[in-house]
């Protein structure tokens, strides 16, 4: 019996993916472990491996297709001894019977998955056994049907403009959305208000302006609509949920990093050289920050936690995420067991992560999970800011620039190299006094870097 190859869920929060490239073609034989395709998610481009042996009978989703829902059938594999032509014909019939995803209503943006539990789970492998398609909840439309009737051109134009078809008033036969309706929607005309979210317990959140209301504030032709990509939408959803569901509080402290800068200069000057006489590593201030945060969490273990409704997760190791800017957004690769690693190892890992993050080549296990995070804007001259916690973390450290400031010591004014840091804490998991202990431990370590080595 033919085996369906499904669009895999490459991360706990993945709902759709782009089929970037097929590395095998119809008629090719594959065995378990062979890389058959490249899938683009909101964060990275990843390779998909076959988990069964057989022959690719039919490719149902061509490369370059975007927004393919998780668990949709993307190809059919004929097992050993099976008739490839019969499997291919059966796949074509099955695909014809299935509803076209382009005409299905877009689901309302879901809140991020329960990160404390989901992020700890192993990354699922692409499924190959037949599985029922996840049924999308039908949304009531103006034409009274669950499906949105629209022309192919209208669907394409709406997708390019980043406009949900469900919000466009159709003027074609039987309420069908046509290209003219999409053009009107771009200028703010004919747009319906977003569907109301289900009522939730607790205080309600004031509604934000609709697209139509925002567009009405600006002169037509004075702006360009740039559709959101998957990464930007995911960042918006996760951080909005973080601010709305996590009670943040902030602790700021100033650190004298004079000893750190002297130690950094000495370490880099004595770094071993390669054959081309280039240093094998170059330690940055951020490498010291990562190490200090990791050791501080070991000293204050009640801060090395993640909140879940069922109980507190107390982590044994300090897995420190580090925010890395990339085109269109940011990503947070994780230095695992950072408290056990040398500064040179942390430096090498961060250089590798940063390069692959910007090329969207990170694996999910390299940026999912973690117990805390560091966000450093000091290189931009920012001396103080607050950062938003990224679940399942219970804290994040915002690091400002180092600068010369006057300080009072023994009744005398002196000039010192100071750096301000702000710790954001999840008040459900970390109370004020506990958070103060953590940032105090960080200050002690960063001001006396030799203590990190003990």
Image (cartoon, helix red, strand yellow):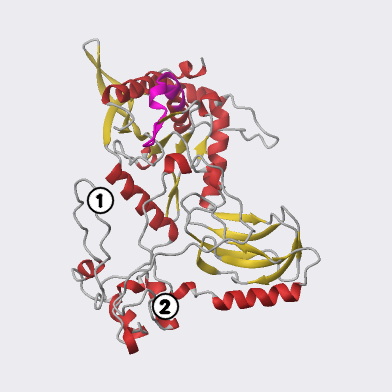
- Position of 28 with respect to 218 (left or right) is right
State the residue in front, 383 or 269. Answer: 383
Considering the image in quadrants, where does the N terminus appear?
bottom right
Q: Who comes first in sequence, dot 1 or dot 2?
A: 2
Q: Residue at x 24, y 69 (%)?
A: 193
**Pointer 1 residue:** 200
Q: Is residue 69 above or below residue 58?
A: above
- Report if residue 421 is visible in the image: yes
Q: Which residues are magenta?
A: 294-311
Tell me the crowding category of disc 1: few under 14, some 14 to 19, or many 20 or more residues within 10 angstroms, Cα based.
few
**Pointer 2 residue:** 155
- Position of 285 with respect to 210 (left or right) is right
Q: Residue at x 69, y 54 (%)?
A: 51
- Position of 428 with respect to 287 (left or right) is left
Instruction: Find residue 163 and name its label.
Output: none
Percent of width and height locating residue 148: 38, 77
Q: CA distance from mark 1 to mark 2?
A: 32 Å
Percent of width and height locating residue 97: 55, 77
Label 2's element?
helix
- Say if the magenta span includes residue 308: yes
Q: Is residue 116 above or below residue 151?
A: above
Q: Quadrant of residue 447?
A: top left
Q: Residue at x 30, y 25 (%)?
A: 254
Most distant residue in the right direction: 81
Q: Residue at x 42, y 22 (%)?
A: 301
Percent of width and height locating residue 205: 21, 51
Tell me the crowding category of disc 2: few under 14, some 14 to 19, or many 20 or more residues within 10 angstroms, Cα based.
many
Most distant residue in the bottom direction: 173
- Report if residue 258 is visible in the image: no
Label 1's element?
loop
- Say if the magenta span includes residue 440: no
Percent of width and height locating residue 229: 42, 62
């Amino acid at each position: 019996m033919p085996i369906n190859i499904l669009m895999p869920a490459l991360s706990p929060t993945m709902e759709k993916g782009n089929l970037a490239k097929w590395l095998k073609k119809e008629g090719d034989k594959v065995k378990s472990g062979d890389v058959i395709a490249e899938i683009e998610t909101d964060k990275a481009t990843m390779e998909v491996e076959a988990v069964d042996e057989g022959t690719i009978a039919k490719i149902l989703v061509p490369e370059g297709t975007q927004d393919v829902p998780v668990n949709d059938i993307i190809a059919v594999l004929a097992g050993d001894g099976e008739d490839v032509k019969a499997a291919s014909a059966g796949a074509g019939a099955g695909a014809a019977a299935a509803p076209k995803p382009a005409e299905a209503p877009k689901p309302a943006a879901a809140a991020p998955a329960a990160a404390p539990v989901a992020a700890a789970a192993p990354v699922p492998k692409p499924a190959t056994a037949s599985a029922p398609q996840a049924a999308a909840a039908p949304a009531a439309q103006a034409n009274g049907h669950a499906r949105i009737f629209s022309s192919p051109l209208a669907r394409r134009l709406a997708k390019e403009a980043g406009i949900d078809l469900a919000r466009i008033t159709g003027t074609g036969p039987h309420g069908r959305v046509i290209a003219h309706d999409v053009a009107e929607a771009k200028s703010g005309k004919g747009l319906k208000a977003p569907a109301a979210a289900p009522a939730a317990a607790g205080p309600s959140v004031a509604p934000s302006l609709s697209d139509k209301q925002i567009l009405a504030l600006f002169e037509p032709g004075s702006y360009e609509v740039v559709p959101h990509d998957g990464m930007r939408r995911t960042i918006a959803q996760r951080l909005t949920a973080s601010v709305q569901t996590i009670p943040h509080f902030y602790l700021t402290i100033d650190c004298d990093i004079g000893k750190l800068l002297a130690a950094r200069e000495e370490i880099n000057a004595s770094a071993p050289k390669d054959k081309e006489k280039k240093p094998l590593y170059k330690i940055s201030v951020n490498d010291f920050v990562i190490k200090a945060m990791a050791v501080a969490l070991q000293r204050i273990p009640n801060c090395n936690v993640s909140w879940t409704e069922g109980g507190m997760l107390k982590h044994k190791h300090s897995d420190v995420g580090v925010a890395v800017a990339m085109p269109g957004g940011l990503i947070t690769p994780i230095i695992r067991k950072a408290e056990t690693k040398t500064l040179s190892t942390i430096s090498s890992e961060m250089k590798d992560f940063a390069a692959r993050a910007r090329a969207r080549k990170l694996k999910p296990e390299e940026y999912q999970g973690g117990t805390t995070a560091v966000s450093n804007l000091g290189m931009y001259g920012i001396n103080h800011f607050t950062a938003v916690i990224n679940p399942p973390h219970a804290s994040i450290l915002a690091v400002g620039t180092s600068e010369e400031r006057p300080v009072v010591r023994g009744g005398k004014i002196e000039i010192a190299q100071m750096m301000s840091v702000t710790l954001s804490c999840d008040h459900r998991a970390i109370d004020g006094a506990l958070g103060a202990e953590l940032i105090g431990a960080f200050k002690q370590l960063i001001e006396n870097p030799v203590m990190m080595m003990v």
